[in-house]
Image: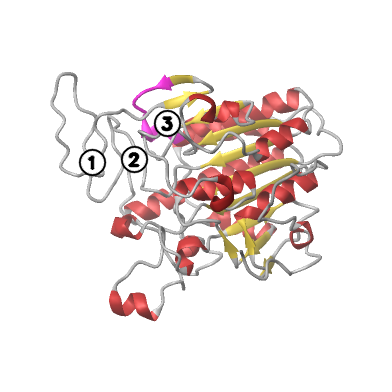
Amino acid sequence: MGTPAPWSVLLLAVLVGLCTSPVAQGKPNFIVILADDLGWGDLGANWAETKETPHLDELAAEGTRFVDFHSAASTCSPSRASLLTGRLGVRNGVTHNFAISSVGGLPLNETTLAEVLRAAGYSTAAIGKWHLGHHGHHHPIFRGFDYYFGIPYSHDMGCTDTPGYNVPPCPPCPQHGAATSPTNKDCYTDVALPLFENLTIIQQPVDLSSLVEQYMEAAARFIQQARDSSRPFFLYLALAHMHVPLQIAPPPDRGIYGAALREMDALVGHVKHLADSCGKGSTLLWFTGDNGPWMQKCELAGRLGPLLGAWQRAQGGSPAKQTTWEGGHRVPALAYWPGHVPAKRSSHAMLSTLDVFPTLVALAGATLPPNRRFDGMDVSPVLFGLSDVGHKGFP
């Protein structure tokens, strides 16, 4: 699997002895990992040409792989809003991405998964990219999360001193007194990207080279605190990967995207180890993506696998993010829960990120908020291998 990243050695030592208190009785822990702009073919378990995901492939082998799993939208904010509400954008009010200048966010009359689980006795945390509003009560701390550590939107929506990779490339933040005249209209030079812990900005601009390490440390702290309180936990880990690669040093034997994909894979491997250290069978880990790859980023974009049709090959159109072609919303999905979710299984049931909300609520023994329509459904029978029947279609 290659030489581990320098930060991973220290984290491994921390994680081995992390979980020492007994598992909260009766209720499972939940970890939902949401990758950003990940292609269906970015997992070796899905596409044999991909070689950079040994930990995700191990997760697939030890759990269930969903081959017909769909995000609720083909762009960031609407997809995330649907995952956390179980409702399509036409119902929850989020149909477009929020910008740095946006003053709104996920409507405050929407109930989030975190709010329902917290009311059921769970410790809740959001770590990573939020992108559902960053002003006032749209902040995740006011949306059901006890703890938040992350960035308010995508990591290319603000300048940093050491920018990650982009096409075309973006400059670092201007020095004090320097004029700002970006050559790329998609680059941000007026606002430095902030890193939040709860309501406090702890770093601005963010050091992208240490973001993965900081996310892992925050996850470890949160889980330890939850276990110290003898409460089950819900961790929503929204990765910066694979939107555009972070500041990394790619080895000579593979390109920038491949190196970033391997970095993401290692992070997921550590999260799996963290879940197992808390007692195998105590934690459901659900991995998926918010939408398909960002093909405009050329060599920095993800892999569609087989989801590239004759029209795109002939006409050159994008079948991925921001489109309703299959590559825009059909995403990788894996579920891992030893003793509950069958290993070495591939499910062909048509499922969606919309199903995460009602399924976790049911597994927690909680009830769905009344007086509203949900577009997702409880897919526990599919998770447990008792059925392979999902949605017949979506409204």
Residue 351: image x %, image y %?
A: 65, 62
Task: Give the residue drawn at x 46%, y 55%.
Answer: 38
Specify the farthest residue to the right.
26
Helix, strand or loop at disc 1? loop
CA separation in Å, label 3 and label 2:
19 Å
- Note whether residue 224 is visible: yes
The percent position of residue 344, horizontal first and vertical second, equals 70, 65
Q: Is 218 rendered above or below residue 200?
A: below
Magenta residues, as a range? 202-211
Residue 205 lies in the magenta-colored region: yes
| In front of the other: 290 or 95 | 95
Which residue, given by chain and number where applicable, does mark 2 sit on? Answer: 156
For the residue carrying disc 2, how many other residues have a C-alpha within 10 Å: few (<14), some (14-19), or many (20+)? many
The numbered mark at residue 170 is 1
x then y, percent, for residue 137:
54, 26
Q: Quadrant of residue 72?
A: bottom right
Amino acid bearing label 2: Asp
Please report contact status of discs 2 and 1: CB closer than 8 Å, yes or no: yes
| Residue 134 left/right relative to 18 | left
Q: Position of residue 47 (x, y in %)?
A: 50, 68
